[in-house]
Image: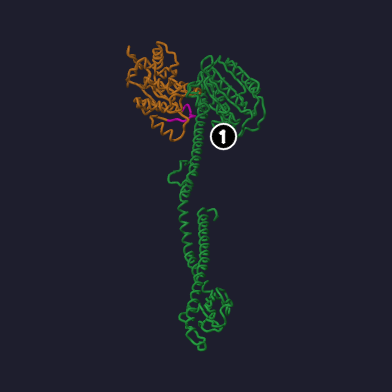
Amino acid sequence: MRLLIVEDDHLLGDAIQAGLTQAGFAVDWVCDGLAAENALTGQLGCDYAAMVLDLGLPRRDGLTVLKGIRQRGCALPVLILTARDTIEDRILGLDTGADDYLLKPFDMGELQARLRALIRRTEGKATPRLEVSGIVLDPAAHTVSVDGHPIDLTAKEFALLHALMLNTGRVLSRQQLEQHLYSWNDETGSNTIEVYVHHLRRKLGRDLIRNMRGIGYLIEKE
Amino acid sequence: MLTASLKVRLTLAVSVLVGLLWLIAAGATWLEARHEAEELFDAHLIQAASLLIAQTNGELDDEDDDSFEESHAPELHRYARRVAFQVWLDDRLRLHSANAPDTPLSAKREGLSDSVVDGERWRVFSAWNDRRQVLVQVGERIGARDHMARAVAGGLLKPLLIALPLVALFIWLAVRHGVRPLERVAAEVEQRSPEHLAQLPTNDLPSEVLPLVERLNTLFGRVARSFEQERRFTADAAHELRTPLAGLRAQAQVALGATEDAARRHALANVLQGCDRMTHLVEQLLLLARVDATGPGDLVELDFAELVREVVGQLVTQAINKDIDIELAAEAGGALRGNSAWLSILVRNLVDNAIRYTPRNGRIRVVIEPVNAAVSLVVEDDGPGVTEEELSRLGQRFWRSQESGQNSSAAGGSGLGLSIVRRIAELHGGWVKYSSNKASPTGSGMRIQVKFPKNGTIQGNESLLKNPDALRAFE
């Protein structure tokens, strides 16, 4: 899950990036409204799973950024994270196109949970837990179990499995998977996805992830 | 509170004035009427006397002296009682009116005279015939004349009794109509809540009330602006306090959740940095509140150059840590009246700001020099500076340069430093000027100049700030 964070406060942005990375998200962080627009109109575009948007931003106000992406018809889930606490501000934020509104200071756990809920709803799923062939993935608890036995996964392995289980029956290209896994700061090797798939197969069984040669990987629906 | 009401005051004043004028008019009329009546009645007396003389002349010629008996003239009308006459022939009363006494009406036997007969005052005209044989005296009760004059004056006074209340009522209504715009304004102001500061309507106002309403509107405007400023400050302060707090909390949670030691140490270091930033921000906020609340305090003659040297000395280590070269140029003549504590804070804020926003290996120049009747302090750096548009926003509370973006919050600026500088300069009657330091080696940078009047025109600073001409005099 790749997220875009727009926050001009250095300390807070750094913390959000670290906190969400801990929760298994790939996080890109920009510090002003213009950079946010560039990130959203760039190659990655609407590939972000969600955006955390501050309102009081340099160069371009958060609401202007939000209005812009909604006018382009982008359905990206947006969570506004701001210190503006009046009812009017919240109503304006939600009516401009935000999906959620969280006030500073906030709890990191709550921010993570709200983002998971937003992403889950966009994927059209009501239950937070994903289940395929006896493998249960709980995004909130960050746990995976096979037939009731908990399995230890690294953050990247978990993120890869999460992406594939969210899109069961659909082939995801290596590039798409990389976007789910890595933020701009991460160094990506040429065959890292293959390495993680290999690890997952070893831990969860050979047949779970199918490799469609030259196209990508998928987990089939039951 | 009678006198406090314009309506009562005006009505009373005008009514009393009208009543007095009317009374004076009635009195004058009475005097005039008396005078005219006197002339008229005297003329009648004279005419009546001459008629009697003409009459008696004929009769006395015709008749025998002895047969002429004293006789009464008949009383023809009750008004005749007011008039009496006597005809004397050789000092014998020969003919008289019924109400005339036997004695002469007047002792004076020629012309007009006043006399008293039987306790009554009479106006008498006496005249002789040509041969001075017959004396005719015609008299009239003076009371009759008075009565007439009084009747004329009374005729004027009676309408006054009826008219005065009417006049007073009319004046009352007119005055009430006249002050209605005032009452309308009063009612409009009274029903306002303290937050309702819209302008009062100025149409249909009499020219006497218009200035009052216009001043009220000016006041409303000023109060509304200060409310708005207060509101914006509160909103900004909320934002400026919540964001670093959110950062602190988030960093602490990251540290708690971190599995790797390096990540935890990084987060904890950030927590410390955030605490320092919060401390700086809160200190600046308190400082600003204190500068806003207190006056300049005690002013003493001080050596400004020495004060700047001391403050810069305290900040030198900070500059050395960033490999920044600080140069201090202080000419003689930097003496001025001021509060050394506040001035130290002003200098520290300016130099600290310069160190924060100047990149490594930069240069900062601090110059103190006397300019006419003022002392000028210039702090310039060769850092990134700000855009022309941003120059105008410098000194606004919580405002930080956006071009330096992430750089500024990383620099740990509170956005309050220049507000504090400006306020302290104002307390000393001075002012602050921001410009770009285009002459620097890098071609960019900030140049901030503060000018203080040497004698420390304290308290007059408000008017000085609102009067640009006064400012120009300093330059």
Depicted B163 relative to depicted B66: above or below? above
* Colour in which the image shows chain B: green
Q: How many numbered marks does the figure carry?
A: 1
Of all residues, the one furthest to the top in this rendering is A190
Q: Can residue A201 be seen in this view?
A: yes
Residue B280: image quadrant is top right
* Colour in which the image shows chain A: orange
Which is more toward the observer, A43 or B64?
Answer: B64
Q: In this view, does B291 lie to the left or right of B239?
A: right
**Element type at mark 1:** helix
Which is more toward the observer, B448 or A117?
Answer: B448
Q: In the picture, which quadrant includes the N terminus of chain B?
A: bottom right
Q: Residue A106 lies in magenta, yes or no?
A: yes
Residue B342: image quadrant is top right
Q: Is residue B76 left or right of residue A211?
A: right
Q: What stretch is highlighted in magenta?
A: A101-109
